[in-house]
Amino acid sequence: MRAHAHIGRWLGLGGLSAVLLFGCRPSPSGPDGAAEPIRVGEFASMTGKEAAFGQSSHKGTLLAIEEINAAGGVLGRPLHLITEDNQSKPGESATVVRKLISRERVVAVLGEVASGRSLEAAPICQQSRIPMISPSSTNPKVTEMGDCIFRVCFLDSFQGAALARFARQTLQSTRVAILSDAAAPYSVGLAAFFRERFLAGAGQVVAEQKYSSGDKDFKAQLTAIRAAQPEAIFVPGYYTEVGLIALQARQLGISVPLFGGDGWEAPELIQIAGTALEGNYYSTHFAPEVESTVAQNFVQKFTAKYGAAPDAIAALGYDSALLLADAIRRAGAAEGAPLRDAIASTRDFSGASGLTTIDPQRNARKSAVMITIRDGRFCYVQTITPEEALRNEPSPGP
Amino acid sequence: MMPGRRFLLLLGAVAAGSVLSLQSHRINPYFLDVAVTVAINVILAVSLNLINGYTGQFSLGHAGFMAIGAYIAASTTMFWAPGLLPAASSPGFIGMAVFPAALLAGGLAAGLAGILVGAPSLRLKGDYLAIVTLGFGEIIRVIFRNLESVGGALGLNGIPACTNLFWTISMAALTIYAVTSMVHSTYGRGFTAVQDDEIAAEAIGINTTRYKITAFVVGAFFAGIAGGLYGHFKLSIDPRGFDFMKSIEIALMVILGGMGNTVGVIIAAILLTLLPELLRPVAEYRMMLYSFLLILLMLTCPQGLFQPRFFRRLLSPFLRGSAAPAEDPPRPA
């Protein structure tokens, strides 16, 4: 027992050093100069499983901040972006957001791509009443966490409506089959929203089949769908499975178009599917071909800086920072309630991903773009505005 | 150490916890976050040390026990308590009365799962047991991922913020108290006996089965409490947060601290929690540097971080008179 006689002493020493370490107050940061920077926090999955998304979003945000500063900043003050990595790990976001708010004293927080990570940070931002803008978390729950939580991307409920309209109007289909991923909440949700709007538009869902993320063989489901003779097949999954589904559908002689949501968006989609996806469609947030000056400026600068064309997540990251800067400018102050109110009252803000209006539920009302695959490349087809997608009338039809 | 002194230390820690907790509004929330995380990791590491270190049963399922505690405790404060006592759903009441009950429920549920895992450990040893416990942890995680009533893949959000410094420090002190009291009691010598030589222990009449299951149940119980504290602190739990990487993290603290060395494990838990935070300024290279430091620590201190003799010699000028350091027998690692 003697060997452990020191436990108490060490606990004492440990407690003392903990008090010394944690008891000291942070020194107020930043000089009191005229152009003191406005501190903006960002938390992102810079490393770990979702690093591809996190990096992409961060590149867009960084580009926007640099652009704003090159133009003289906001209210005569430059923006200072402080980025923290959450390693794509649950539990980390809460810590880094607390750090951003209490140590770095940021005026607003930008992040995250993954809805799960955004949901962790949201209650902490809400508690401190620091506005948080999520660039691309599409789960409805995120903005329900409180009146300081916003997003600049559309919701899956809107995406489902836009796709229903596209199927009915552009594809001229009345008979659609659905093949969804039962293991992904995103896919299940999008399928449900689509079904509701498509049925409301006097469409008919002739077959519904399910698979699980990671499946490799879809022939059983596709054979059942073929028997129902649909005019189009809705596949609201992720690109990993969608590529294989397209290949196997063509092998089974199914020639009707396939269409899906933003889960399709990845260069790997074409690598997996080869030519099988030619002439098929998906909806997303942004297309490099959109002919607005903001979008073209963004594409040009992004390509010059990073050597690759931006994707939708980069565009949304870019827009989240621009929208924040715009709100600071309109509020005339970079803090507290005026800033929150300015973000909440954003109307027809013009960003790289189109016009964004923040609705009373703090979600973005904005357009979706439809993309088709032609000659192994993603090509812009059309834009579906919220007004078009949510118009509640049975489609005229031929 | 006399049991009385150990108990006084426990009371002291609880008192310190309540004082710090009352003053917590003065502490920067980020530091508070780190301090609470440190205390939760101390609970996890010390409780795993009972299984892995003292009893020598290599378990990689600690995150699974933690997940059970986190989900059961969160369900208690969020659904069951307001359902049973609709009148008593004020935040104050939940924080004062429901929360301790929720922690206890989470701990007991995890302890029950400890029996389930302890039972196969009778047949398996070493790597085989590690694989079984790893499988158990993954099963738990997948079950919670598929339970829509607790949020499914998206996780459980909107958990009330009940965890404070008082609860975490008290629970950490209680864990340390319980584990050290247990292994240093006459009964508890059996844990070390099982670890040293199972056949010899059995030959002298020690019921090794009972010791192994006891270790799993007690270890799991405290892991469940740590889970409950974690959920009510992060306010959101995600099944992916309890994957086997989390178990490895905890096992790392035990190995680095020195198997069966409570003080070393506590120091390792503190160090391994603070290190990633201190390394934040180097951004993307953080985890690389962290891993490098781990390799370095493992190479320089293979016997564990805390070696009483070395520290005692270092501190002997300050400690003279209070103890007789030179007489202590060296402890086997």
Image (tube, coloured by chain):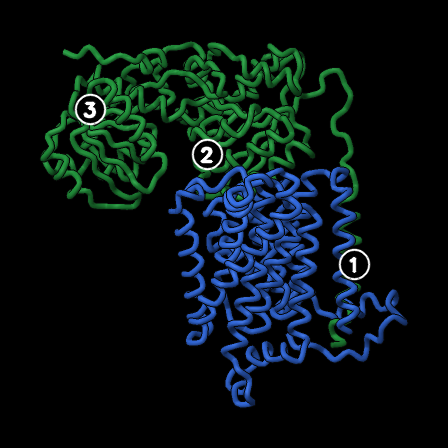
Horizontal placement of B40 versus A46: left or right? right
Instruction: Provide residue A329's location: percent of width, then percent of height.
Output: 61, 11
Question: In this structure image, what is the colour of chain B?
Answer: blue
State the residue at coordinates (18%, 24%): A204
* Residue type of the residue flagged with mark 3: Gly
Q: Which amino acid type corresponds to the residue marked 1 in the rendered image? A: Gly
Identify which residue, A241 or A115, lies in the foreground. Answer: A115
SS under mark 3: loop
Kindly state the secondary structure of the residue where label 1 is placed: helix
Q: Nearer the viewer, residue A91 or B295?
A: A91
Is A305 placed above or below B228 here?
A: above
Q: CA distance from mark 2 to mark 1?
A: 42 Å
Chain where mark 2 sits? A
Q: Which chain is green?
A: A
Amino acid type, callout 2: Ser
Q: Residue A279 — which label?
A: 3
Label 2: which secondary element: helix
Q: Is residue A97 visible?
A: yes
**Is A169 located above or below residue B139 in the figure?**
above
User: Residue B296: x and y, percent?
Assistant: 61, 59
- In the picture of the structure, the residue carrying the numbered disc 2 is A115
Is residue A92 shown left or right of residue A381?
A: right
Q: CA distance from mark 1 to mark 3?
A: 72 Å
Pick the quarter of the image with the C terminus of chain B. bottom right
Q: Are marks 3 and 2 in contact (CB under 8 Å)?
A: no
Among numbered discs 3 and 2, the one appearing first in the sequence:
2
Q: Is residue A226 above or below residue A287?
A: below
Residue at 30% over, 45% down? A214
